[in-house]
Image (cartoon, helix red, strand yellow):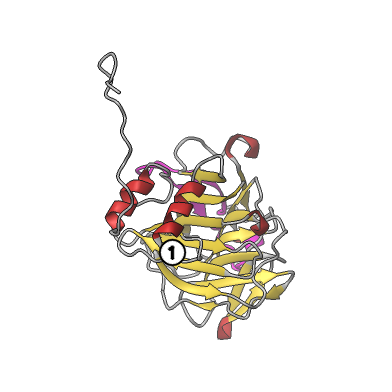
Amino acid sequence: MPAAHGITQRTAGPVIQSTAQQVQRRLAAYQQQILSSSGAAVIGITDAGSFFTDSTVEGSLQEIGSFANRLLPSVAYHFLDDFDTYQSSFTALDHGWLLLTGTDPQALIPDIDNSVGGSMLLTAGDDAGGTVATNGSQMVGYTPSTADQGNLIFEAMVQLQTSVTDGVICVGFTDNPALEMPFTIAAGDVITAVADDAVCFVYDVRADTDEWFVCAVDSTVVDAASATTGIAPVADTWYRLTISVSTDGATILFGINGVTVATMTGDTGVSPDVSLYPTVAFSSAAATSHTARADYVFLSHDR
């Protein structure tokens, strides 16, 4: 049919073909949250539970098409905060976050800073006791999700600033919308779940292995696959941390910068029907104040 009034008629887009670049262009029409055009950034997660990126496509094209369909707002719920539009003086109902801090005067409520594009700055206290109750700075999402809603995905871009020494950080989901470090890791790489149900990336300077860990707990039982990832955080370096949880909560995939680093399956995972809140919890384990940033937080699940 000819165009009217100078308006060019919209035509159907190209079909999805076999290269990652063509897939990426097609998906761009459906979502803007975690799509990236450089490196091995995660484009999404297939129905089969594997990450696919802009440099490597894992899974069938049918799975990718299904994922693109889930990005439609009528099919799935999405939450994206790029931390560029408000300050912490607003209430949780205004901006979607509970902003929490420890009792030490140097521990500050998470707040938007003036970095390019905006980010949430978390400032830990410097109390020698090194607990989250004194040194913590934490953001917890106001609205919970559950694994049994289906296709539960979390992603955040975080950075430990200046130094990783003395830092403790948990990034992911927790069941407690209050000041709490969901997991801690002690000497001997002993993982302790403080939350009853949670799944997180964890870095704790008190561990023997100074690397990102993946941790999950279901009804106080820590998943046996909770372990280190082989990737050590570097100061002033951004890390894209992605978590995908199956509908029954038993299978969990973890990705760092678009690469699958761990898979939990067959043990405990997380409880499928327990409310889980997105969180970035940061603290100092010693008498030195440190800062961390969250550039954005994204989550999604089926309607």
Q: Is residue 247 left or right of residue 25?
A: right
Q: Is residue 113 above or below residue 138?
A: above
Span highlighted in magenta in the image: 106-133
Nearest the eye: 27 or 94: 27
Q: Nearer the viewer, residue 232 or 53?
A: 53
Question: What residue is shown at x 57% (from left), y 86% (from top)?
Answer: 188
Residue 42 in view in this figure: yes
Q: Nearer the viewer, residue 285 or 251?
A: 251
Classify residue 136 by image quadrant: bottom right
Residue 66 screen position, x and y as percent: 48, 53
Q: Is residue 44 visible?
A: no
In the image as oriented, which residue stretches furthest toward the top?
5
Question: Residue 223: image x %, image y %?
Answer: 64, 76
Residue beneath label 1, please?
Answer: 51
Q: Is residue 267 left or right of residue 220?
A: left
Residue farthest toward the front in the current orientation of the protein: 1
Query: Are there few (<14), some (14-19), or many (20+) residues within 10 Å of tag 1?
Result: many
Query: For the point 47% across and 55% down, which residue is it?
Result: 156
> Main SS type for the magenta part?
loop
Residue 248 x/y as whole percent: 66, 65
Q: Tag 1: residue type?
A: Phe
Dot 1 lies on which element?
strand
Instruction: Please identify the residue farthest to the right as the structure is shown.
Output: 219
Q: Which residue: 69% across, 65% down?
A: 197
Q: Which residue is rendered at x = 69% and y = 59% of the image?
A: 175
Front in this rendered view, residue 197 or 292: 197
Is residue 7 covered in magenta? no
Tally the numbered discs: 1
Quadrant of the drawing holding the N terminus: top left
Whole-percent x, y for residue 247 in the image: 63, 61
